[in-house]
Image: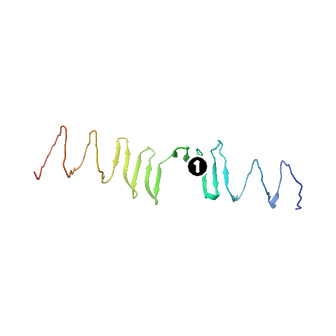
């Protein structure tokens, strides 16, 4: 309970008790185990195992900043990560789908089988498939160039001139207004 000013103390073990320890100035601790609340009032630097792969809480910017190639990991066993390589930004997911949502509605889904689904108002409109793409709804385009074989099911309405080059098989033709 007494207070002494004794200068430098070198110890291999110390029991401070319930009174607490107040250190003014620089302190280096090799191994710290903290039980309870820890409050950091300034910047905090999290050192990575590899040089320059650190994370840093910048109080003045109110942001947690990650150096290049330092990852933010999510889920048990880091199933999802975010990182910047210095030139590219990566979002990586190893289990389930990867969703981008807006206002709690699906906008983009990358499925576990690597299909890409695009949504409008939480409804699928565009899907990549192994054979190409699948579009749901009306497609509006200023110009469309189709190469290869095209198969249409249902009615085709061509409002304007139709120019067909090459051999054409027509099973049932009805011509009006000629």
Residue 166 picture location, percent across and down = 19, 37
Identify the residue position indicated by label 1 in the image: 72
Residue 132 placement, left or right of 16: left
Q: Is residue 171 above or below residue 17?
A: above
Q: Position of residue 34 (x, y in %)?
A: 73, 54
Instruction: Identify the residue shown where x is 43% and y is 55%.
Output: 106
**Number of marks in picture:** 1
Is residue 79 shown above or below 20?
Answer: above
Dividing the image into 4 quarters, which one contains the N terminus?
A: bottom right
SS for callout 1: strand
Neighbour class for label 1 at 10 Å: few (<14), some, many (≥20)? Answer: some
In this view, the residue farthest toward the top is: 167
Viewer-side residue, 160 vs 130: 160
Report the coloring of the rendering: rainbow
Whole-percent x, y for residue 25 in the image: 78, 55
Residue located 38% across and 45% down the image: 128
Asked whether, in this view, residue 115 is left or right of residue 56, the answer is left
On the image, the x and y values in percent for residue 88 come to: 52, 44
Q: Tell which of 18 and 39 is nearer to you.
A: 39
Judging depth in this view, the residue of 143 and 14 nearest the camera is 143
**Residue occupying image coordinates x 67% and y 54%:** 44
142 left or right of 115 in image: left
Q: Residue at x 18, y 48 (%)?
A: 161
Q: Please indicate whether residue 176 sits to the left or right of residue 36 in the image.
A: left
């Amino acid at each position: 309970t007494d207070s002494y000013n004794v200068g430098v103390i070198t110890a291999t073990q110390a029991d401070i008790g319930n009174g607490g320890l107040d250190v003014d100035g620089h302190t280096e601790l090799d191994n710290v185990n903290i039980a309870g609340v820890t409050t950091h009032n300034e910047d905090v630097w999290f050192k990575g195992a590899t040089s320059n792969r650190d994370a840093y809480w910048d109080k003045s910017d109110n942001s947690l900043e990650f150096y290049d190639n330092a990852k933010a990991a999510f889920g048990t066993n880091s199933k999802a990560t975010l990182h910047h390589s210095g030139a590219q930004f990566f979002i990586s997911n190893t289990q389930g789908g990867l969703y981008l949502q807006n206002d709690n509605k699906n906008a983009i889904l990358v499925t576990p089988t690597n299909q890409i689904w695009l949504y409008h108002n939480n409804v699928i409109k565009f899907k990549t498939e192994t054979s190409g793409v699948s579009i749901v709804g009306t497609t509006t385009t200023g110009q469309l160039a189709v190469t290869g074989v095209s198969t249409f099911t249902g009615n085709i309405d061509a409002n304007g001139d139709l120019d067909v080059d090459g051999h054409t098989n027509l099973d049932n033709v009805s011509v009006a207004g000629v």
